């Protein structure tokens, strides 16, 4: 007596089990990325830095599921799609175009920028109320100052960072975010009070240490994480209720390394606004955040000759 031929419907459900498991794995990593350990090599932070791009696994798995004619794989794919949309779907929606509040701009201008005056002209053209810059050099600072002074009469600088404002700036002081092991003269944090039409706002500008990715050491972010703790403590100690943070934080809002800061602040719920690298942006490591105020929209601006794109945001006070 011959073997009974398997029913086609049952075969379609049995095929592609590995693809179905891979779909479930993608959904798990999206939903429970915080469960991925950071040791060794800070793998958790690395995953979170590029977390939205994990969704690119779905089209590939979908194509394989069709090739395998697998109902199981196609059904399992619904889970990562739903989780991705729950996490990032809102970022695809248009932002709030309300005229209320102020506009802030953040840009790492690059210490190798070949045309600081041209970069400054482009930034002024964005007509933001506040402009924060990082990687200013002694040779580029005069060019930025001269180009921006007519539209931004108020300025605060320390080390390699600066803040230009249409509003008066007072109580300007450096903020120590220097990790242990970095030498004297490393000044990448400042704080100022901007007197807006809606009242006083504390404005912080920061440039956290860079991260490195290598096969030997993995995702090296120890200095950045330590600096984030110091910055978070400075913001927590700020006496003014309303705070705006502008900076190259070398971290995305999903990265747990930024939690000491991001847990105290809010950022826009719309717009990916990828800012790095400028040639092919894959992550927003430049941030505009607020406390006791609302970041209603964030977007990236055209390139300026830096390896970062500028980003701008509307902030409701």
Image (cartoon, grey):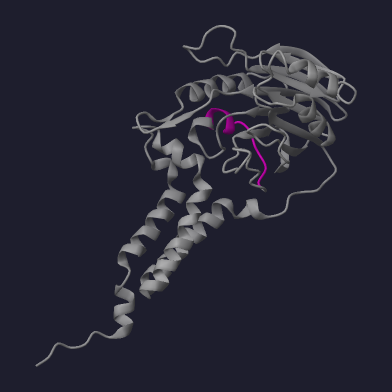
Position of residue 218 relative to residue 14, above or below, is above
Image location of residue 103, percent across then percent down: 79, 36
Image location of residue 204, percent across then percent down: 69, 23
Figure label count: 0
Q: Nearer the viewer, residue 198 or 281?
A: 281
Secondary structure character of the magenta stretch overall? loop
Residue 138 falls in image quadrant? top right
Which residues lie in the magenta part?
259-269
Q: Which residue: 45% across, 42% down?
A: 47
Image location of residue 291, percent across then percent down: 68, 31
Q: Which residue: 53% across, 26% down?
A: 210
Q: Which residue: 24% across, 84% down?
A: 6
- The quarter of the rendered structure image containing the N terminus is bottom left
Q: Residue furthest bottom?
A: 1
- The quarter of the rendered structure image containing the C terminus is top right
Residue 21 falls in image quadrant? bottom left
């Amino acid at each position: 007596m011959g073997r009974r031929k398997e029913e086609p419907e049952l075969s379609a459900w049995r095929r592609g089990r590995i693809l179905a498991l891979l779909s479930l794995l993608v959904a798990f990593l999206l939903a429970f990325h915080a469960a991925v350990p950071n040791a060794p090599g800070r793998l958790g932070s690395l995953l979170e830095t590029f977390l939205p791009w994990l969704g690119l696994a779905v089209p590939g798995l979908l194509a394989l599921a069709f090739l395998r004619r697998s109902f199981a794989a196609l059904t399992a794919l619904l889970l990562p799609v739903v989780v991705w949309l729950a996490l990032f779907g809102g970022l695809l929606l248009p932002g709030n175009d309300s005229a209320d509040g102020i506009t802030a701009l953040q840009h790492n201008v690059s210490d190798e920028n070949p045309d600081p005056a041209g970069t400054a002209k482009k930034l002024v053209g964005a007509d933001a109320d506040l402009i924060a810059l990082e990687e200013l050099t002694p040779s580029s600072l005069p060019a930025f100052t001269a180009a921006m002074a007519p539209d931004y009469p108020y300025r605060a600088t320390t080390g390699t960072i600066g803040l230009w404002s249409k509003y008066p700036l007072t109580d300007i002081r450096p903020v120590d975010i220097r990790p242990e092991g970095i030498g004297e003269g490393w000044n990448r944090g400042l704080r100022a009070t901007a007197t807006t039409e809606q009242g006083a706002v504390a404005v912080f500008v920061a440039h956290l240490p860079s991260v490195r990715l290598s096969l030997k050491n993995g995702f090296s972010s120890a200095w950045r994480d330590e600096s984030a703790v110091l910055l978070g403590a400075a913001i927590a100690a700020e006496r003014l209720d309303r705070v705006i943070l502008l900076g190259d934080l070398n971290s995305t809002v999903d990265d747990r390394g930024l939690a000491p800061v991001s847990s105290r602040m809010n950022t826009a719920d719309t717009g990916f606004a990828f800012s790095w690298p400028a040639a092919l942006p894959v992550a927003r490591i430049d941030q505009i955040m607020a406390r006791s105020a609302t970041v209603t929209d964030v977007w990236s601006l055209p390139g300026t000759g830096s390896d970062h794109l500028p980003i701008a945001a509307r902030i409701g006070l």
